Image (tube, rainbow, N blue to C red):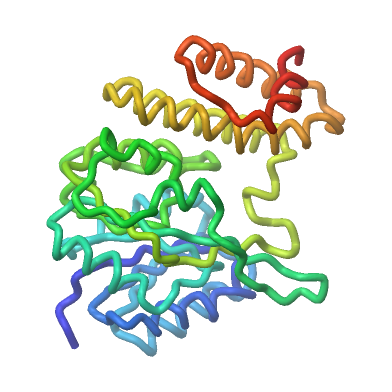
Amino acid sequence: MSTPTVTVIVPGRDVGAFADEALASLRAQTRDDFRAILVDDASRDHTAEVFAATSAADPRFALVRHDVARGLGASRNEALDLVETPFVTFFDADDVMLPAALGTLVGSLEESDSDVAVGAYVRLRADAAGHYAPGVVQPWVAASTSPARRRTTLSQHPDVSGNIVAWSKVSRIDLWRSEGLRFTEDRAYEDQVVAQQLYAAASAIDVVPDVVVHWRERADGTSITQRRHAVPVLQDYLDGMSGGLAVLDDAGFAEAARARVRLILDMDVPALVRVAEHHPDETYRQLLGAFTRGLIERAENEGVVLDEASAPLLAAARPW
């Protein structure tokens, strides 16, 4: 067996319905010189059994088990401390990794000597019968990864800041350790801040337009992005976006911060406003209104041009 080059960190809690497919997609990678660390975060379903069976059958897989749930951020951080390969990536145990994903991203870094490689992704949604099918690459994803670039930077390609998910990239473990990078713990949207830290610290970034992951939006509505109606989840969401912007501001990446402000106001806020308009808790509207007013003021002061289609929803959020 080849010496491992990249470690794939796979946390999971109560994803037994999807874990077999996810791990099968990892085993089917065209590049097989990987090590995988499976972290069962005190699952109450059969996730632990799926993880254990895979680790018993394939020596590339190691299993970590929690007796008490610690959360996604803590699970990823624990596994980061166990990485012994030059590269690291993340993969959620309810998603699907395309066969060439590791080969494309790791291969790009080996050829370019960049610190981070970023790929595209699509949502995996269920139809009325419960069958999942991948969608199309969304505009903000395409803007972050297309056209292909080698050894670019956050200053040269500010739109890469819109790709904030943990599992669409491969990076050098030395960068994580030299910068002391960690995921936020005990909060949702734990990848927002660390993504911007990673981009800001990277000496060079590769972006590839290839789709590397199908990101599952669960039919039962339990995905974190489907629970934004909950006030605590909204607070974590807003804090994550604000924290990511603060990273870009503090590091002096003004163009990337403007690109991020534009994307949040054009994409994130309108979707939240639609929830807020019918939400029974006034706190939800107050939180979103304060956040939106601050971003709109910033956009106006900095000359950020927004999509005209989002204007009515942004206007609705102002008085809240």
Q: Which residue appears at 63% of the width and 15% of the height?
A: 293
Taking depth in this image into account, of 294 and 50 the one nearest to the observer is 294
Taking depth in this image into account, of 172 and 295 the one nearest to the observer is 295
| Count of labels in the image | 0
Residue 277 in the image: above or below residue 198: above
Q: Is residue 81 something that shows in the picture?
A: yes
Image x and y of residue 259, in percent = 44, 31
State which quarter of the image contains the N terminus. Answer: bottom left
Q: Which residue appears at 64% of the width and 55% of the height?
A: 223
Q: Which residue appears at 68% of the width and 63% of the height?
A: 218
Residue 8 in the image: above or below residue 156: below
Residue 189 in the image: above or below residue 8: above
Q: Which residue appears at 46% of the width and 32% of the height?
A: 260
Left or right of 72? Residue 127 is: right
Residue 9 in the image: above or below residue 116: below
Task: Tell me the quarter of the picture where residue 99 sits.
Answer: bottom left
Task: Tell me the quarter of the picture where residue 120 sits.
Answer: bottom left
Left or right of 82? Residue 310 is: right
Left or right of 154? Residue 193 is: right
